[in-house]
Amino acid sequence: ASAAPLVEALAGGDARAREEARLALAWLKEAALPALLDAVRVEDVRTRRVVVELLGGAGRSAPETIAPLVHALADEDAIVREQAAWSLYRPDAKEAIPALERALLDQVAKVRECAAHALACIGPENLDALNAAVSDEDAHVRAAVGEALAKRPADASAQLSRLLADSDPGVRASVARSLLYGGKRDSKGVRDALLRALEDTGMADRHRQAQA
């Protein structure tokens, strides 16, 4: 079955019909990709939201979906931008790194958070944007930034130590987990801050029990 009519149905007025079209497109998987790629720039925002979501599903392993998702990171709709960032949570999306770094400055915290998670998955290269995001006002964003910086602890020891002493306990615990289970604790400063955070969050005892 052709996917194009299903994409057109995403802009319809009937909510049930839109949901059925979304489910059918998800079921078609790779067969729906050509129609989805053609619809990334359509005017209807509801369609763009679903299309970008589906590109992160059916198109997760398709390299041709990366460029359209990068374009969607600059969409005027925050939900589209958020979904685009989440759909770029894939290790092969290195070409998306500059756009994801720009997304760390988005006005919407959820977009910034998803962009940081995506950078953590891809593997950060230039750390300047992530280093600046350590001071983000949103705790969830700071935690995601810590997850990304934990991939390069030797180059981000000061920032990681700062996050391990964050005022929010959730941030401290999240960054500690990223370092603890990521197995990269090269800097002595990071190791010391990690030990303090582990004791502070109660994770140290749980970790010792797990190792016993």
Image (spheres, helix red, strand yellow):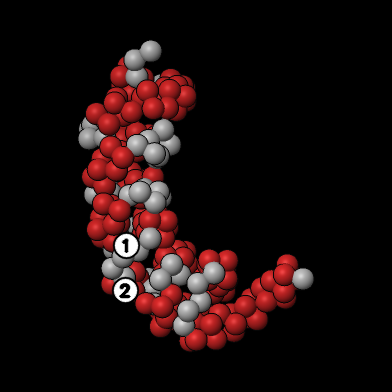
Percent x, y for residue 169?
57, 74
Quarter location, residue 208: bottom right
| Element type at mark 1 | loop
Q: Is residue 156 above or below residue 112?
A: below
Q: In this rendering, is residue 171 above or below 69?
A: below
Q: Nearer the viewer, residue 53 or 153?
A: 153
In the visual, does 182 lie left or right of 106?
right
Q: Residues within 10 Å of mark 1 (few under 14, many from 20)?
A: many
Looking at the rendered structure, which numbered label has been put on residue 104?
1
Q: Is residue 46 visible?
A: no
Give the x, y percent position of residue 184: 50, 72
Q: Are marks 2 and 1 in contact (CB under 8 Å)?
A: yes
Q: Amino acid at mark 1?
A: Leu
Residue projecting furthest to the top: 1
Residue 7 - label: none
Q: Nearer the viewer, residue 110 or 197?
A: 197
Image coordinates of residue 165 in percent, x first then y, are 51, 82
Quadrant of res 130: bottom left
Answer whether residue 184 is visible to the viewer in this image. yes
Q: Residues within 10 Å of mark 2 (few under 14, many from 20)?
A: few
Disc with the residue nearer the chain's start (2 vs 1): 1
Against 144, is 200 above or below? below
**Disc 2 on helix, strand or loop?**
helix
Q: Which residue is mark 2?
A: 132
Compared to residue 96, the image places residue 57 above or below, namely above
Q: Quadrant of the C terminus?
A: bottom right
Where the N terminus falls, by quadrant? top left
- Type of amino acid under label 2: Ala
Q: Nearer the viewer, residue 179 or 211?
A: 211
